[in-house]
Image (cartoon, rainbow, N blue to C red):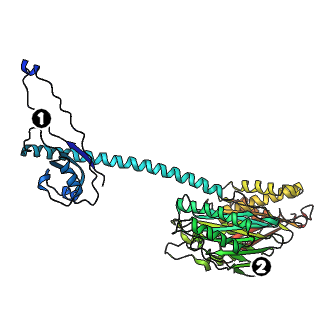
Amino acid sequence: MSMIWHFLRSRWPLARRHDERAAEAPQVSVVPAPPPQFDIAPDDPILDFFAHAPGPVTLEDVTLPSPALTAMKSAGVQLVVPLINQGELAGLIYLGPRLSQQEYSRDDRALLSTLALQAAPAVRAATLAQQRQAEAILRERLEQEMSVAKQIQLALLPKEDPLLPGYTLTKFYRPARAVGGDFYDFIELADGKLGIVIGDVSDKGVPAALVMATTRSVLRGVARRHASPGIALGRANDILTAEIPPHMFVTCFYAVLDPVTGQLRFANAGQDWPLRRGASKTDELRARGMPLGLLAGMTYEENEIVVERGDCVLLYSDGIVEAHDPARQLLGFERLREWVMAPTSGERLISALMQQLAEFTGPAWEQEDDITMVTIERALPGTHLLCAFSVPSKPGNERIVMARVTEAVHALTLPSERLEGLRTATAEATMNAIEYGNSNNPELTVAVEVWVSDAQVRVCITDHVAGETIPAVTAPNLEAKLAGRQSPRGWGLYLIRHLVDEVRFSRDPGTCFLTTELILHRTLSAKGANTP
């Protein structure tokens, strides 16, 4: 309870006549002593006593085991007037002895009671104003600190994906608060190998961000000194056990990728098992180990796999599997595994996972924990990804897609008429995805990928189609459209079919995601057999 304490001393000197004798008398000025200060503990019984007092209190009549009461009596306080506002003790007026040495009269007490009734609301208002001002200053300082912490944390995360020939690495990071405890990192190692880290600090906010920064620094140091992921985690654990607070720990998965052979050696410190989607199955990357920072001297199991061409490995934090739907049902590992089984590439996989998560949790979901994902994808022979991106489902965004696809294939030097056909087909397919697939909902995205091989250029456009059937390509009824019996739209799929060499539609198993693939054969110099 915040208190404002007031000290008044009654100094009413006798009136003097202004005659010659008075003028000749020496002038005596009385200077009030500064009010004493009392530190009253919140649990001091004197506070409860004053809060229930019916009016001014004579201290010599009060006997309580109260340090504050003893201090007041020692300072010469004789009378205390409680200031009560809305049933709460807002402050105290305490008075010393009168200069006349007379007792406080009934009229004095009545006057003081009236004064207390008038002063209590003002004292209460002033106290609340001071509290709010202090809270505003504290809040502003905390916001500044959080902003600085966020900037530092984001500066520590990799700004660009590593460029590995034949591989695509994609990351996603969304903290639950302004500053989170999740992190990921890419560490360049000797012989062209790459260290890949994903971790989660047990706490949240600024403390977690500070531990995250420490862990990242430690891991980078030990990773460059120890080629073995298991040994590196063991050394990091010994350092962090002595450095971070005892109630905190860090889960962490650390892998070393050899891009030439595809060998991925890994160790795990309590992190959820990553998933590897291969050509025929999805399995876990299992390794045992305690979280970092709990106990020194821990050892970490080390295993390895080979990332084959076409494989996609997903590393993730527990923020996604521990999300709940409106009925408080846990998303869980098995549901995530089912989603990962869909044959989508890295960036499209992350986009699909986030859309499926949004459907599972519902629109009113408040993110409970940080969500971080990293994908490692190895391209099929002769095929590599030129670009991958997504756009909100807003009319007009097809122009953005068309421009970025054009930029991606610019170096392929396609004949101008075939490039223009691909551009137009891309715009039409994107408009269909925005309007029919995603119903012009800007919260849903259209994912775009451009793949190239020696044989073909492939543009993949994925939407969140509401229907369950693959669309059929049929010739439009020109007379019905001209007569106004059909919508002027509906030319899209028919037009697309005659602008590129192949059009394919595929649906991810168990999801609503529909992918339209526009394929242009690089061996053809002109449109060929499909020209109308």
Instruction: Count the labels in the image.
Output: 2
Left or right relative to 282: residue 11: left
Can you say which quadrant of the picture contains the N terminus? bottom left
Residue 383 drawn at (x, y percent): 84, 68
Asked if residue 497 can be seen in this view, the reply is: no
Number of other residues with Cα within 10 Å of mark 2, as a class: few under 14, some 14 to 19, many 20 or more: few
> Which of the two residues, 408 or 256, is positioned nearer the viewer here?
256
Neighbour tally class for label 1: few under 14, some 14-19, many 20 plus, Cα within 10 Å: few
Pointer 2: what residue?
A: 279
Residue 228 horizontal/vertical position (percent): 74, 73
- Residue at 42% x, 48% y is 136
Q: Which mark is residue 73?
A: none
Q: Secondary structure at mark 1?
A: loop
- Counting from the top left corner in percent of width and height, residue 298 is at 62, 76
Q: Which one is nearer the viewer's eye here, 379 or 286?
A: 286
Residue 17, x across and y down, in percent: 6, 23
Q: Is residue 304 above or below residue 61?
A: below
Asked if residue 411 lies left or right of residue 66, the reply is right
Numbered disc 2: secondary structure: loop
The amino acid at mark 1 is Trp
Closer-to-camera residue (252/294): 294
Is residue 146 rendered to the left or right of residue 102? right
Q: Residue 336 versus residue 200: which sits nearer the camera?
A: 200
Figure check: 396 above or below 274:
above
Instruction: Give the residue pinned by disc 1.
Output: 12
Please state, as top left, top right, bottom left or bottom right, where the C terminus lies in the image: bottom right
Q: Residue at x 17, y 49 (%)?
A: 80
Q: Looking at numbered disc 2 in the image, what kind of residue is underneath it? A: Ala
